[in-house]
Image (cartoon, rainbow, N blue to C red):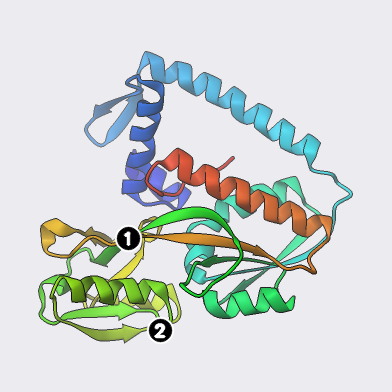
Amino acid sequence: SITETARRLGRTQPAITLQLQRLEELTGKQLFEHGGRRLTLTEDGTTVLTYAKSILRLHDELISQLASQEIEGQVVLGTPDLYAAFMLPSILSVFRKSFPRVQVELNCALSTPLVGLVKRGDVDIALVTRMNDFTGGQVVRREQLVWMTGEQSAAHQERPIPLALLPPGNIYRDYAIDTLERANLRWRIACVSESVGGLQAAAFAGMAVTVLGRSALVPAMREIGPNEGLPPLPKIELLLYKSSGATSKAATALHDYLAHYLRLDEELSGRGAPIELG
């Protein structure tokens, strides 16, 4: 059941469907047979599952060998709550299993102040959205921005269009307004929130349309596209920063894990939907 799988993994149903489609594209075989709302494995699907279990077992053994039990310490990781909620849980779960003696302290804040914190050394590692004035950092992922609103909402049909956006100075906000302006669509601000929870609340209530990365599409929300009158949005880049003072093996291990798995996530999902690791 795609519905049950999405619930257990904390992912959206469209994300799970995209992963299954991507897997069939990669193998060039039909791996699943659809029977109503349930899926069953084909013969090729059973073969893939057998090998997949072996690959994951070898992967876990490799990680265990490489993860030195001697590496310990505390690392402060800064990121907006959007990425903390929708991108990092599976990666941090794998990291904790591999480095059980490393303590990760999560600091959730907006991207611009986080870059200042990591450059001052108050945060060891930061995963942020690239803003126009940012310098440095390592591009580790590209995320497609999409319009979202509540599942039953018709907010996108209102004129002016009510928007739920991050505060001024954020590129999500800038792209939303600029895209509507270029399409000659009138808009108004209905909600301003520094947290993704506030934006989602406005969308759930049918008060507004918001702009988030596609990986943040959750149940009870739906994506709105050109077919419903809203212009397409661009992709944004995620940057990974490491403080010059973060020289410990623990900080290096976390930085390398994030860089590797965020790239792997994007490559395997094809369109930026999240995957479940390990």
Viewer-proximal residue, 44 or 164?
Answer: 164
**Residue 101 location, x and y as percent?**
81, 55
Q: Amino acid at mark 2?
A: Pro
- Please name the residue shown 16% across and 74% down the image: 155
- The residue positioned farthest toward the right in the image shown: 70
Tell me the residue that label 1 is attached to. 234
Callout 1: SS: loop
* Between discs 2 and 1, the one toward the N terminus: 2
In the depicted structure, whether residue 20 falls above or below residue 211: above
Callout 2: SS: loop
- Nearest to viewer (mark 2 / mark 1): 1
Residue 112 position by quadrant = bottom right
Q: Which mark is residue 167?
A: 2
- Please name the residue shown 40% across and 27% down the image: 26
- Please name the residue shown 33% across and 40% down the image: 17
- Please name the residue shown 61% across and 30% down the image: 56
In the depicted structure, whether residue 260 falls above or below residue 172: above
Residue 89 position by quadrant = bottom right
**Residue 178 location, x and y as percent?**
27, 75
Residue 194 position by quadrant = bottom left
- The residue positioned farthest toward the top in the image shown: 43
Q: Is residue 99 left or right of residue 84?
A: right
Viewer-proximal residue, 255 or 202?
Answer: 255
